[in-house]
Image (cartoon, rainbow, N blue to C red):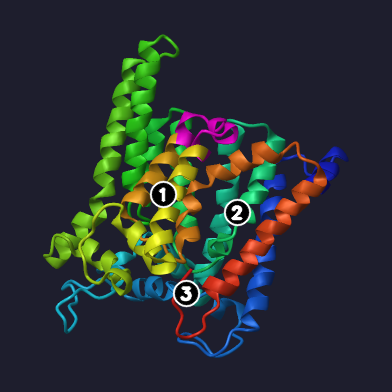
Amino acid sequence: MVDGIKQATSRGLFQVWWVRVLIVFGSTRLLSFSLFLLTARIQGDNYWTKAHPGYFDFLNIWDAEWYQKIYDYGLGQLPGYPTVLPIDAAGNVPQNAWAFMPGFPMLVRALNLLTGIEWKYLAPLTSTALSLVLALVIYKIFTLKFDAETSLWSILLFGLSPASPVLQVGYAETLGLLLLACGLYFLMKHQYFAAVPFLVALSITRPGMVAFAMMLGGMWLVRHFKARRGFAEFPTGERVKLAALAALSSALGFAWYLFAGWVTGKPDAYLLTELAWRAGFTGHAKLVPVEGWFISSNWYFGPVFGPILVIAAIVATVWIMFTPGVKALGNELRLWVGTYLLYLLLVFFPQSSTLRILLPVFPLFAALGVSTIRANRWLKLALVLVLVFCQITWLLTCWLYTAPDSTPP
């Protein structure tokens, strides 16, 4: 695919960088569109739709329902969030809208006021349009470290990734990734104040600002020690700006947590709501860092192989972080990947949604891209086919709903 576009550019067509990116990434969205249609043909009656739903109906199932509830409540109020935290008959907090931040549904509501288009169509169309902008920003990030050919190849790999179909459904993932990418871009350009609006918006769109703050703290330390050893400069002005951005990001990381507590009068409202999603596995236990990984692995693989797999995954992740491709990402992107994975290790409960939750480590596709860009075309084709197969598997396993279904996307 990339080779074909290169030939077109060599003939004088599509000389502008953003045209090439949109063609490559747009082709991946057309593929996901086609796969959604094929999957919908085998979808039976379910909680949200009748059998064989249309494209837009099929894209508004699973968590899209929660975002639509927030959207439907209206502007100028708490959009869909209960002011009194719900409690079930056993005295526990059940699943509720506080687990879903308002950034994406608020954006769709604003667009609805401008266009009059209803949620069912507008939410997926907004996500799809934002995914194209996301591809442009990610490409610009990659070109800060790699040449145009490698960056374009990496964009293709990201667009074909297993959970990439979620970039065109009524979820907040696309907007969250776009805001994250903008924050990373301006950080890498050392334009710290320019990153602030995107980080503020990200803090009410998707979780993860704590990981971003960790990354900024790590970045400050890296630059500090490099400066002490004479390897690079770290002027006082940049020290202050980077420290201020880290402090702001830390505060933003807890903003939604504090807001939910203030509205409901229960300080841990957000945490209790998030824990409700894992209650079927853990019961209504408190959050213990890292423990979720061992409970999950025990559930899926048993008490012997489960812990071994967790330890093996941690070791493999550490090894990956020191491979040539990942080291080529540079300090900022490598630190982001590392701190986000550490954040997931501490708080995440791995299950079928893991591939979607891993989308923020998109820089790893640049590491894969730089490691495979010189491979022959048959190996590249094999890699593309493997990714397409994984995407089909994700759709059939996670998005296709067959009651009782315990594999949410």
Horizontal side of residue 78 vs 5, given as left or right: left
Horizontal side of residue 161 vs 375, given as left or right: left
**Residue at numbered disc 1:** 311
Q: Position of residue 352 (x, y in %)?
A: 47, 66
Q: What range is drawn magenta here?
A: 320-334
Is residue 349 at least partly visible in the picture? yes
Q: CA distance from mark 1 to mark 3?
A: 43 Å
**Residue at numbered disc 3:** 119
Query: Disc 2, disc 1: CB below 8 Å?
Result: no
Marks 1 and 3, the one that precedes in the sequence:
3
Q: CA distance from mark 2 to mark 1?
A: 37 Å
Q: Amino acid at mark 3?
A: Trp
Q: Nearer the viewer, residue 123 or 58?
A: 58
Query: Disc 3, disc 2: CB below 8 Å?
Result: no
Residue at horizontal 57%, vertical 51%?
133
Marks 2 and 1, the one that precedes in the sequence:
2
- Closer to the camera: disc 1 or disc 3? 1
Q: Position of residue 284 (x, y in %)?
A: 22, 70
Label 3 CA crowd tier, 10 Å (few <14, some 14–19, many 20+) = many
Q: Assess whether residue 330 is covered by the magenta stretch.
A: yes
**Residue at numbered disc 2:** 132
Q: Secondary structure at mark 2?
A: helix
Q: Amino acid at mark 1?
A: Ile
Q: Assess whether residue 247 is covered by the magenta stretch.
A: no
Q: Position of residue 236 (x, y in %)?
A: 31, 16
Q: Position of residue 88 (x, y in %)?
A: 19, 81
Q: Amino acid at mark 2?
A: Leu
For the view shown, which residue lies furthest in the front direction?
A: 304
